[in-house]
């Protein structure tokens, strides 16, 4: 739709531009237009901006460096591998311009890595990268990391509330302080580039990244996004890029929060005026604050993927809005362009992506990109422009002067990781982010000197209160021991209550020894990230039935109930609201869980410590199918509007009889998903052998006897499949276990996606069990015999095949038990029960 124009044209004598490699003059709007006329009709909708950091000296230095570089060295600047797929020797050989550690990537694959371990790796890559005796170009590399709520891949780091909570606090100075503290913790690990802020304006809360968005309101995003940029990079004209300040990234450009149905990586259908009005505001303010990098988004705009969008990347961002920093692609985002793969994509570079994020395939992508550059498929002027942008950012960030990562002021100093000053900022952020939705009869604030029951699965669970992007990509698999500087919500309550001679009892299931005076119930969503958090309706799923039962039981016992709801977005929780006297939206507060109690409790002498300040940054739904729901909608009818939030002065009563029924559009499809990247609520995935049971929580696991290993692998998306690897004679099985027996009799078929690369040499079996001595086993041999190797198949099995072997479908306990008797590798994905819909792959007697 938007024709690519070689930038050489834009640099011709007749056209004066600020594009690097084309001179340093100011842009005038008319000149940036070799793009087809039709595409630029709306260009006037975009603000015309100039780079706040343009400097002739910098440009001179860029040109000097550039002119000394070989094409090989230039292309290496454009490629960004992940530390898990790039050795130090690779760095020495290729001289990559940057690299990243994705979510859950640490030095030596060790979650417990210290600041010194991180710096050692940074120094090793740096030495290799600037090693001019090899093929390196003596240009310091950049290391990018997703420090999106503190330095969240690092053990012991301060974990700040996710952006949604900061949107509720809506305090720009606080956000700037968070940016500064985060940058210092990142600097302590020798890393110089942060992939934050996310300036998405989430408009449909079903989106799995809603919590990364400050607000549905672009005004809030605009202000807070720029504040984080200033915190990370420092302020223009004063402490910009001084010691402890790092490179920031505004992401994901553009329109990620406005996709249809809130689908991650989906299609945004807004018109161009809305794109500017809603989704571009955080970029406009970030550019003004001097943000040096922008990350391209996975999403499309009217069907065109952003990584290939020359108009939005080049014409709008770089030319019209004067952005002279660099555009980095997202994780293999280039590979999603038509005609591209993860290892080859001239189109993304030609459209205006300057660095391709190629976590696994950096070397192959380098080779193909070099060939494309040599063949002129990527014009030399485009390569020079991209490299100039990268050099400009490195110069402005002071990387040439900062030199050895190990020698910088903060490097390797463990005391900065989780520093007390940073934790104090985090605690303030938590206090200010809490939104009081309901406080009937002014139950809150609580007197500390009473008998307090603390219950719910979030009460003493720092992993749950921190959410996704915490030590692991999805934020799953963490225990309190993984947060040496973190405090749970319970720990803060205990401290407050005991200091005032009250008593506190913790019980996840709500049972108690002594009847409490009040119960604090901490419940909510379990961690997720990106597309894995996409949902079909806003109906609260994680503890759907169990939480309401817990609340009802407390209510029946006559105990006043305060619910603290941990969540990445507003959800339909009418049943839970009805059972609660007070209800607090606590979002995903992070490691300073103790701060919740500082707001809930009065001092021993009866004074309020901190009042509620948080206001809803997103509209709260009245029905589960009410999404999108945004202030300004024609029939806007939320349960609680944008900006709502009670304080202790308010005497507002929220009805206890909010509608609880869900109509049919709101219920999900007629099939039942048991495992979709991770087990559905109520199921757990385990590796079982004669030595015991191992519950799978993260993206890798081994059975107790080590004979079966499991690793999350990529199929259609990142880590959406499981690779199972059995050793010879393994007794280990993969088991999907239901927490309470499942009645599957309404379903007809079990469907699972599978891929294998060789025919098994012994039986591979699939079983179900319905308790001790109740179950049945099927041999999958006919499936392997009839379907091709090396590709994915939808494997369909009639449930009556299990019934015929003795399985009671009304009482399933283990819904899926997979075993191989010989050494074998098999990938699986998406286990579900469905109505009779497809031809079955096994024949077996009718039930
Ligand atoms: C996410 C980005 C992130 C990148 C690197 C991507 O999948 O969309 O936000 O910066 O991974 O981990
Ligand atoms: C990786 C993470 C990364 C994410 C980005 C996953 O496959 O393991 O490190 O952040 O993809 O989407």
Image (tube, grey):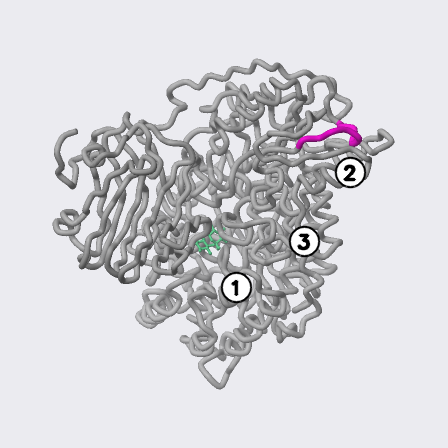
For the residues labelled 3 and 1, the Cα–Cα distance comes to 18 Å
Q: Compared with residue 670, is residue 566 higher up or lower down, i.e. above or below?
A: below
Query: Residue reaching furthest front?
Result: 773
For residue 411, what is the image quadrant? bottom right
Q: Residues within 10 Å of mark 1 (few under 14, many from 20)?
A: few
For the residues labelled 2 and 3, the Cα–Cα distance comes to 21 Å
Q: Is mark 3 within 8 Å of ligand 2?
A: no
Q: Secondary structure at mark 1?
A: loop
In x, y percent, where is residue 631? 56, 26
Provide the residue span drawn in magenta.
445-453
Which residue is pictured at 49% across the width and 52% down the height?
473
In x, y percent, where is residue 155? 60, 58
The tag earlier along the polypeptide, 3 or 1, is 1
The tag earlier along the polypeptide, 1 or 2, is 1
In x, y percent, where is residue 220? 63, 38
In x, y percent, where is residue 674? 35, 37
Q: Secondary structure at mark 2?
A: helix
Residue named by callout 1 = 110
For residue 444, what is the image quadrant? top right
Q: Residues within 10 Å of mark 2 (few under 14, many from 20)?
A: some
Q: Is residue 152 left or right of residue 648?
A: left
Magenta span has 525? no
Residue named by callout 3 = 485
Of circles 1 and 2, which is in front? 2
């Amino acid at each position: 739709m938007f024709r690519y124009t070689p930038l050489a044209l834009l640099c011709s004598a007749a056209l004066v531009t600020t594009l690097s490699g084309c001179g340093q003059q100011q842009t005038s709007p008319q000149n940036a237009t070799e793009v087809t006329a039709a595409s630029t009709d709306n260009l006037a909708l975009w603000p015309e901006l100039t780079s706040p950091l343009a400097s002739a000296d910098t440009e001179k230095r860029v040109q000097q460096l550039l002119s000394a570089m070989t094409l090989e060295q230039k292309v290496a600047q454009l490629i960004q591998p992940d530390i898990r797929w790039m050795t130090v020797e690779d760095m020495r050989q290729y001289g990559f311009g940057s690299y990243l550690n994705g979510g859950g990537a640490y030095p030596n694959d060790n979650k417990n890595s210290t600041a010194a371990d991180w710096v050692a790796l940074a120094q090793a890559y740096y030495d290799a990268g600037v090693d001019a005796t090899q093929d390196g170009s003596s240009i310091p590399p950049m290391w990018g990391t997703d420090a999106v709520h503190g330095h969240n891949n690092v053990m012991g780091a301060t974990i700040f509330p996710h952006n949604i909570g900061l949107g509720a606090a809506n305090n720009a100075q606080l956000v700037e302080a968070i940016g500064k503290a985060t940058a210092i913790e990142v600097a302590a690990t020798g890393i110089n580039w942060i992939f934050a802020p996310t300036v998405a304006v989430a408009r449909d809360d079903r989106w799995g990244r809603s919590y990364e968005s400050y607000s549905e309101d672009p005004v809030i995003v605009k202000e807070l996004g720029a504040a984080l940029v200033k915190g990370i990079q420092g302020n223009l004209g004063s402490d910009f890029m001084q010691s402890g300040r790092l490179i920031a990234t505004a992401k994901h450009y553009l329109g990620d929060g406005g996709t249809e149905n809130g689908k991650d990586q989906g299609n945004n259908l807004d018109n161009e005026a809305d794109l500017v009005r809603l989704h571009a505001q955080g970029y406009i303010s970030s550019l003004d604050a001097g943000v040096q990098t922008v990350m391209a988004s996975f999403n499309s705009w009217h069907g065109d993927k952003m990584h290939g969008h020359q108009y939005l990347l080049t014409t709008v961002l770089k030319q019209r809005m004067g952005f002279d920093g660099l555009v980095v692609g997202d994780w293999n985002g280039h590979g999603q362009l038509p005609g591209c793969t993860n290892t080859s994509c001239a189109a993304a570079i030609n459209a205006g992506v300057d660095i391709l994020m190629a976590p696994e395939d950096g070397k192959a992508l380098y080779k193909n990109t070099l060939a494309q550059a040599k063949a002129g498929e990527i014009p030399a002027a485009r390569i020079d422009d991209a490299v100039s942008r990268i050099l400009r950012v490195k110069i402005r960030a002071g990387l040439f002067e900062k030199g050895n990562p190990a020698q910088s002021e903060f490097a390797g100093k463990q005391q900065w990781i989780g520093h007390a000053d940073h934790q104090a900022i985090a605690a303030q952020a938590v206090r200010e982010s809490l939104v009081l939705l309901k406080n009937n009869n002014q139950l809150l604030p609580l007197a500390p000197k009473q008998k307090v029951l603390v219950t719910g699965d979030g009460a003493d669970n720092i992993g749950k209160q921190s959410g996704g992007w915490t030590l692991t990509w999805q934020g799953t698999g963490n225990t309190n021991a993984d947060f040496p500087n973190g405090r749970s919500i319970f720990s803060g309550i205990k401290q407050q209550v005991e200091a005032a001679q009250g008593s506190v009892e913790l019980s996840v299931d709500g049972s108690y020894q002594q009847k409490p005076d009040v119960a604090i119930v901490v419940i909510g969503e379990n961690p997720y990230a990106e597309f894995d958090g996409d949902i079909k309706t806003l109906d609260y799923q994680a503890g759907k039935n169990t939480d309401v039962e817990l609340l009802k039981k407390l209510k029946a016992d006559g105990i006043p109930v305060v619910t603290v709801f941990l969540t990445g977005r507003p959800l339909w929780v009418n049943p839970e609201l009805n059972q609660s006297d007070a209800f607090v939206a606590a979002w995903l507060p992070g490691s300073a869980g103790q701060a919740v109690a500082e707001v809930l409790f009065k001092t021993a002498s009866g004074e309020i410590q901190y009042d509620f300040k948080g206001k809803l940054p997103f509209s709260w739904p009245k029905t589960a199918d009410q999404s999108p729901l945004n202030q300004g909608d024609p029939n806007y009818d939320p349960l609680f509007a944008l900006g709502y939030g009670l304080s202790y002065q308010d005497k507002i009563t929220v009805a206890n009889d909010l509608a609880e029924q869900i109509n049919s559009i709101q219920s999900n499809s007629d099939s039942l998903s048991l495992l979709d990247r991770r087990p559905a609520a109520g199921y757990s995935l385990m590796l079982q052998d004669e030595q015991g049971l191992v519950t799978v929580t993260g993206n890798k696991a081994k059975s107790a006897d080590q004979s079966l290993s499991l690793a999350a692998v990529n199929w259609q998306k990142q880590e959406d499949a499981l690779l199972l690897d059995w050793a010879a004679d393994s007794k280990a099985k993969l088991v999907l276990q239901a927490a309470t027996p499942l009645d599957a009799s309404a379903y007809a078929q079990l469907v699972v996606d599978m891929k294998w690369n060789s025919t098994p040499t012994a039986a591979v079996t699939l079983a179900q069990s319905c308790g001790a001595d109740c179950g049945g086993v099927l041999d999958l041999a006919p499936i392997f015999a009839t379907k091709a190797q090396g590709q994915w198949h939808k494997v369909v099995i009639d449930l009556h095949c299990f019934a015929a072997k003795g399985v009671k479908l009304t009482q399933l306990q283990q819904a899926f038990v997979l075993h191989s008797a010989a050494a074998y590798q098999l990938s699986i994905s998406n286990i579900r029960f469905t109505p009779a819909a497809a031809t079955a792959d096994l024949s077996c007697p009718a039930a």
